[in-house]
Amino acid sequence: MGAYAGGTFAYLTRRGTAQAGADGGRMQELGVCTCGPSGAALAAQVTARLQAWNHAMPSIGSLRVDAYPAGMTAAPGAFLAIRKHHTELHAYTSAA
């Protein structure tokens, strides 16, 4: 998932940690990478959104984001649909 504002692009990255989750699998850590003149500002905005999402939905077991051509209707269960000019992103979760 990414964001674009004022000539700057931000995208999410993921890496495994050494810490084990409740199911015994390795926990994952999300990060934000940016490219452009306002990288620090856009990274701060995306990070704030991630933190708000984490506090609002702490029991998510997994996250899936599907990309579709613009105009597609989100399937039942999508908690978020981001509509762009040529594409749409639909986000789905499953309980922990």
Image (spheres, rainbow, N blue to C red):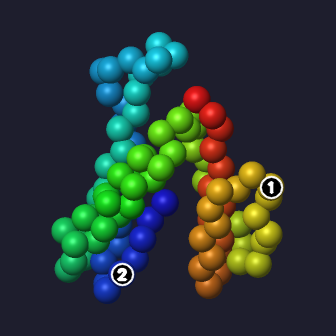
Residue that label 1 marks: 76
Give the percent coordinates (x, y) of residue 77: 75, 52
Q: Is residue 58 above or below residue 32?
A: above
Q: Quadrant of residue 14?
A: top left
User: Mark 1: which secondary structure?
Assistant: loop
Which is more toward the observer, 3 or 94? Answer: 94
Q: Quadrant of residue 48?
A: bottom left
Q: Is residue 37 above or below residue 19?
A: below
Residue found 79% across the figure and 58% down from its top? 75
> Which of pointers 2 and 1 indicates the residue nearer the eye?
1
Report the residue that reaches farthest toward the top.
24
Residue found 47% across the figure and 49% down from its top? 56
- Other residues around mark 1 within 10 Å, as few (<14) / some (14–19) / many (≥20): few
User: Does residue 31 appear to the left or right of 40 in the view shown?
Assistant: right
Give the percent coordinates (x, y) of residue 32: 31, 56
Residue 5's label in the rendered image is: 2
Q: Is residue 72 above or below residue 29?
A: below
Asked if one can make out residue 83 in the rendered structure from this viewpoint, the answer is yes
Which is more toward the observer, 89 or 76? Answer: 76
Give the percent coordinates (x, y) of residue 12: 39, 55
Q: Earlier in the sequence, mark 2 or mark 1?
A: 2
Identify residue type, mark 1: Pro
Report the residue that reaches farthest toward the front.
56
Identify residue type, mark 2: Ala
Mark 2 near mark 1, Cβ–Cβ under 8 Å? no
Number of numbered callouts drawn: 2
